[in-house]
Image: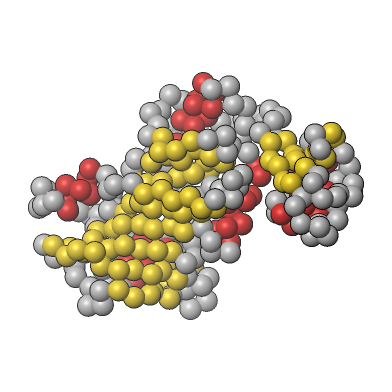
Amino acid sequence: MEFNYTVTTPNLYNTVRDVLKNYFLVSSRLLLKLKNNNCVFLNNKKCSINSTISLGDIISFSLDYDEDNSNIVATNIPLNIVYEDDCLLIINKQPNIAIHPSMLHYDNSLSNGVKFYFDSIGLKKKIRPVNRLDRNTSGLVIFAKNEYVQEFLIKQMQNNTFSKEYLAILEGTLDNKYGTINAPIARKKDSIIERCVDENGDTSITHYKVIKEFNNLSLVNFKLETGRTHQIRVHSSYIGHPILGDDLYGNKSDIINRQALHSYKISFTHSKTRKKMCFEIDLPKDMLSILNNELI
């Protein structure tokens, strides 16, 4: 996989290093790796990263080297692939599957399924999920096919140019049909998993809008400005309307066996084309059935 830049503006960048750092936004760690592996090119010839450049020059770097991904077991898990190119794999994650392997999910996480898929297409790269969802949350998950793509997307998350929107079914009806929840979140004392609103916590901002109300339930759109662990779940509970089925921050439900939360829309700038990309998917069957009054 190769990334290219053609010098079209005089004096904007002086050296190959300038292009790599300021146009491609390559990290210092990756820059050193590219340098040591002779993966940087000027006009299709290997070059020093300190080489000077001129109008019309083509600067490129390659990530076509294999990586060891043997730390993850390959498991044939069905993947609902929404989009794929040489940089990205976007999956519609089903509920009740973790993204990362763990002691409890050593060989049945989404990453195990992606490892199996990468093996089947001959791609020897580490497994790099970019955004993360709780085990019982469904929706869009991006896997980067190399470390540069991962870095590029994470930088967008850090500067709020990577947009993530969710749909959730909340208990009750909200007095304010749209608004912003600005309440800091911290780890709950004496708990490894649970979070809570705490004045000493990290800044956490969630925008919401009620889409539909039915049977003392509300379908709500959430857009995150920050990305704290369990942010939507904590904020929903904080305003007195926990997510339906969320037994950690609310109540168990007889009509759904998980929190009714779905990552349905993401938008970001593609690392290679620099074009804006947007993906949107439907609600899963369990949430649709509630919305259509089939389970109430």
162 vs 77, left or right, is: right
Picture quadrant of residue 209: bottom left
Residue 264 image position (x, y, % from top left): 35, 51
Front position in the image: 89 or 231: 89
Q: Compared with residue 134, is residue 200 higher up or lower down, i.e. above or below?
A: below
Q: How many marks?
A: 0
Q: Quadrant of the N terminus?
A: top right
Residue 235 higher or lower than 74, as above or below: below
Name the one closer to the observer, 103 or 132.
132
Q: Nearer the viewer, residue 121 or 86?
A: 86
Residue 247 seen in the figure: no
**Snapshot quadrant of residue 248:** bottom left
Residue for point 50% across, 25% down: 116
Residue at (49% x, 44% y) in the render: 142
Residue 195's x, y, as percent? 43, 64
Where is residue 19? Give x, y as percent: 77, 52
Look at the picture and state if 225 lies above or below 119. below
Describe the colour scheme in one phrase: secondary structure
| Residue 57 at least partly seen | yes
Residue at image x 81%, y 44%? 57
Q: What residue appears at the point 38 percent right and 75 percent down from the top-left corner?
A: 180
Instruction: Indicate the position of residue 129 as horizontal and vertical percent values.
Output: 53, 43
